[in-house]
Image: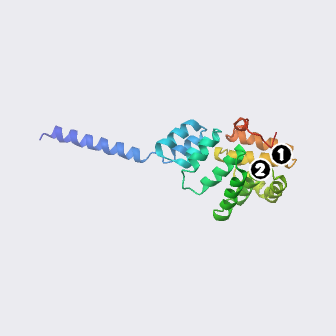
Amino acid sequence: MSLWFWGLLLAVALLGWLVAYMLSQRPITTVQQLLQQRRYEDAVMEANRTNDALHRAEALKLLGRFDEAIASYEQSTDPAAQEGVALCLAHLRRDPERARTIMETQIAQYPQIQEFQSLALAYILLRAGDREAALRLYRDNLELLETRFRDDYTDPDPLLSETLYLFSVLAEANGEEARADSLARQAERWGWSAGMLAGAPDERG
């Protein structure tokens, strides 16, 4: 065979290797990146393509599509998905006992950031009408919550915007109007939309 043919074959092989290498270098956090860019609809589509049930659920929740988010969370094997189910139920004011049981089990079996999980449980209790227990739990964790958002989590993160919203709801219920207003505005800047709960009763009334 001619040198020209071998040269062409080598060039094709090299091009194929370069394409494969470039594809292998693509970030594996595409869905997370879309979430950080607040491109929630695109994140849902990418999560569908990659079969990423957990992040699809997170995107759906940030779109206010809580029923769909619950269905997606329930397809995930990640322990964190159960917390998502509990909060979506609370947002919908649906099955409060189930939401409470899920969250209490989550805290017992998969402890993460204690004050964030306690805040989630306090929100669930508040939405269920147990104001006294909710505020007691909130007050027990208030100092740690303040520290987290003052020192540790300062960069806008849509995946933490819901936590800021929960914080604002509990602050409002605790009579801290200025703090509640500041936290609610911060939650929106970070990616949470207050309009998502327009159809459901809200403790922040």
Q: CA distance from mark 2 to mark 1?
A: 16 Å
> Looking at the picture, which amino acid does disc 2 mark?
Ala
SS for dot 1 = helix
Pick whichever, 186 or 14, lies toward us.
186
SS for dot 2 = loop
> Looking at the picture, which amino acid does disc 1 mark?
Glu
Residue 95: x, y in percent? 70, 49
Please identify the quarter of the rendering in which residue 181 is found: top right
Q: Are there few (<14), some (14-19), or many (20+) residues within 10 Å of tag 1? A: many
Residue 11: x, y in percent? 26, 40
22 relative position to 80: left or right: left
Residue 122: x, y in percent? 77, 54
101 relative position to 45: left or right: right
Compare marks 2 and 1 and give the one earlier in the sequence.
Answer: 2
For the image, the number of numbered tags is: 2
Q: Are there few (<14), some (14-19), or many (20+) residues within 10 Å of tag 2? A: some
What residue is disc 1 on? Answer: 172
Quadrant for the N terminus in the image: top left
Q: Residue at x 80, y 42 (%)?
A: 182
List the single residue furthest toward the bottom.
108
Q: What colour scheme has been applied to the protein in the rendered image?
A: rainbow
Pick whichever, 180 or 64, lies toward us.
64
Please identify the quarter of the rendering in which residue 133 is found: bottom right
Q: Residue at x 57, y 36 (%)?
A: 41
- The image shows residue 92, relative to residue 135, as above or below, that is above
Residue 113: x, y in percent? 68, 59
> In this rendering, which labeled residue sits more in front, label 2 or label 1?
2
Q: Which mark is residue 193?
A: none
What residue is disc 2 on? Answer: 128
